[in-house]
Amino acid sequence: MRQPFIAAGIAVSLCTTLALAAGGGGAREANDVDPYVDPVVKSARALIAKSDWLGAQDLLRKSLQSKPGNADYHNLLAFSTRKGPNPNMELVFAEYAEALRLDPKHKGAHEYLGEAYLQVNDLAKAKEQLAALDKICRFGCEEYSDLKKLIAQYQASHPQ
């Protein structure tokens, strides 16, 4: 009689563990509901969703003063800098590099770094990020698919 309850308890425990392990690291939409998202990341994504690039940059720079080891903060700072007015690409590449130093499998940072390379017309480096995502995302992932699509679009608009 207790066996169904034990099996149900194991199933609930496994689902909870998998749900907790799945979070963090990649790009999410600002309106995604995830109770495990860092409040700074949540606020930065909300600012990014409103194209408030400078507000996001300010928030993330201040937050990095207290949490310099947060890969998501570095990734989003690079992203908001790249998308904002007059992007400092040297800073962009430095912030993505720091995000990947802290978390070498950060899917969002690999995707966005690939986009940054396309922005400066470095197709070979963008393809390196796609290859990295291919290894990280064994069965495919949104970041891989998005970067692959952008690379294809770039190649179509920049014939050699």
Image (cartoon, rainbow, N blue to C red):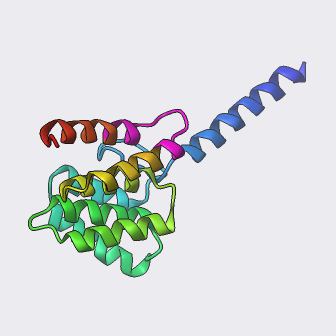
Any part of residue 65 in sight:
yes
Secondary structure of the magenta portion, mostly?
A: helix
- Whole-percent x and y of residue 143? 38, 42
Front residue of 40 and 78: 78
Question: Seen in the image, is 105 located left or right of residue 50?
Answer: right
Residues shaded magenta: 134-146
Residue 148, picture quadrant: top left
Residue 53, picture quadrant: bottom left
78 up-or-down from 50: above or below: below
- Whole-percent x and y of residue 138? 55, 38
Residue 148 belongs to the span the image colors magenta: no
Counting every numbered tag in the picture gives 0
146 up-or-down from 78: above or below: above
Front residue of 98 and 128: 128
148 up-or-down from 96: above or below: above
- The residue sitting at 20% across, 62% down in the picture is 82
- Whole-percent x and y of residue 11? 72, 29
- The residue sitting at 36% across, 65% down in the picture is 96
Question: Seen in the image, is 84 located left or right of residue 42?
Answer: left
76 up-or-down from 8: above or below: below
- Whole-percent x and y of residue 61? 29, 75
Question: Seen in the image, is 59 located left or right of residue 9?
Answer: left
Front residue of 156 and 17: 156
- The residue sitting at 82% across, 20% down in the picture is 4
Residue extending farthest front: 160
